[in-house]
Amino acid sequence: MRFPPRLLINTPDVELWPADLLRARGNHDARTLAQARWLLRRKRDGRYLAAALDRGLMPLLPRWTAGIDADAALDALDHAPPSGGQGLAPAAPLPLHRIEARLESLGLRAEAYAERTGLALVPEPAWLAFAGLDRYRRPLWLQADAALAWRRLQAAARADDVPLEAISGYRSHDYQLGIFERKRARGLGVDAILAVNAAPGFSEHHAGWALDIGAPGEPPAEERFERTPAFAWLRERAGGHGFAMSYPRDNPHGIVYEPWHWRYTGVPV
Ligand SMILES: [Zn+2]
C-alpha cells in the first residue's frame, strides 16, 4: 500500500486525513486504519466516518452520510492527489454560508460581530500541509508556505538553543464552534466566551496562516509566555522569517494580548 500525501483535504463537513497520522480508537479502528489510505473525519465532533482502502470505501459509522455533504467529501476523495502535494494549486477558500447559519445558534450575527470587532469572516482553505507534530504529538496543519516557514523558524531557534513548540495551528469553524458549545454546557455565557475566544468563523486559525507557539514546560497560551527566552527570541528573529504577532497589547480588535499567537505574513518584517 502506498501512503497518501501528507495533506489534510478539507470539505464543508468532512476532512480527509492520511490514515497513518490518526490514532486508532479501538481494535476495530486499528485493523481498518492499518489498511487505509485516507480517513474521512466529521469536523463537527472528530468522529471517524469511513476509511478509504485500496479496495474501496469502508464505513466506520452506520449511516455515515447522514446530515453531511457526503458528495463533497467523496468528490474530494476521488480527486485527492496521488503523492506529495507537489504541483497542487494554492488552496482555494471553502464557502462561508454554513458558518453564518451556525453563528445564529449562538445568538450572534456575523455582520454585527464583524463591525464591533473589526474582524472579518475567515474562510477555511481547501487543503492544508503537514507541518510536523505539535506539543501534544498531534499533526499540525498549516498552509503549505506557512508550514515550511514554521519548520525553518523552529530549526533556526533550535540552532540557537531555544526550543519552540507548536501548540495549535489550523482549526476549523466547526472546531471553534465546539469550543463554544462545551463552554456553554459548563454554564458560561456567550459574551464571557467571546472575551477569550474569537467567534467561530472569525479566528485567524481558520485560514491556516497562524499558529500558537509555546516553550517546553510552559503552560500554553498564557501572558507569562512573554517572559520566556522563546518569546525574546521570537521578538528578535521571527520577523526575519516572515512571522508577525497578530494581537499585541492594545490591539484594535479588543482581543487580549496574545504573545504566543503568530501569523505567517510571507514577507520578512
Ligand atoms: Zn492563536
Image (cartoon, rainbow, N blue to C red):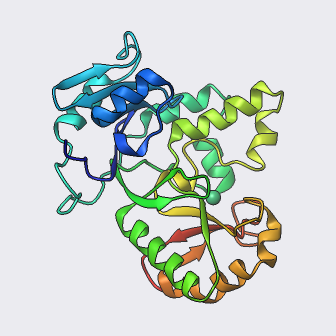
Q: Residue 81 at x, y = what percent?
A: 19, 49
Q: Is 246 left or right of 73, judged from the image as shown?
A: right
Please tell me which residue is depicted at 53% across the width and 50% down the height of the picture.
138
User: How many numbered tags mark residues here?
Assistant: 0
Q: Residue 74 at x, y = what percent?
A: 24, 29
Q: Is 94 left or right of 115, judged from the image as shown?
A: left
**Which quadrant of the figure has residue 96?**
top left
Viewer-closest of 14 and 218: 218
Q: Outermost residue, top direction?
A: 62
Viewer-closest of 202 and 126: 126
Q: Residue 172 at x, y = what percent?
A: 50, 43
* Quadrant for the N terminus in the image: top left
Asked whether the viewer can see residue 181, the reply is: yes
Viewer-closest of 137 and 143: 137
Q: Residue 238 at x, y = what percent?
A: 57, 82
User: Ligand 1 is in which quadrant of the figure?
Assistant: bottom right
Please tell me which residue is depicted at 51% across the width and 88% down the height of the picture.
240
Asked whether the viewer can see residue 18, the reply is: no
Q: Is 93 left or right of 118, judged from the image as shown?
A: left
Please tell me which residue is depicted at 54% across the width and 68% down the height of the picture.
263
| Position above or below: 118 against 235 | above
Please tell me which residue is depicted at 74% across the width and 82% down the height of the picture.
229
Q: Is 117 left or right of 155, judged from the image as shown?
A: right
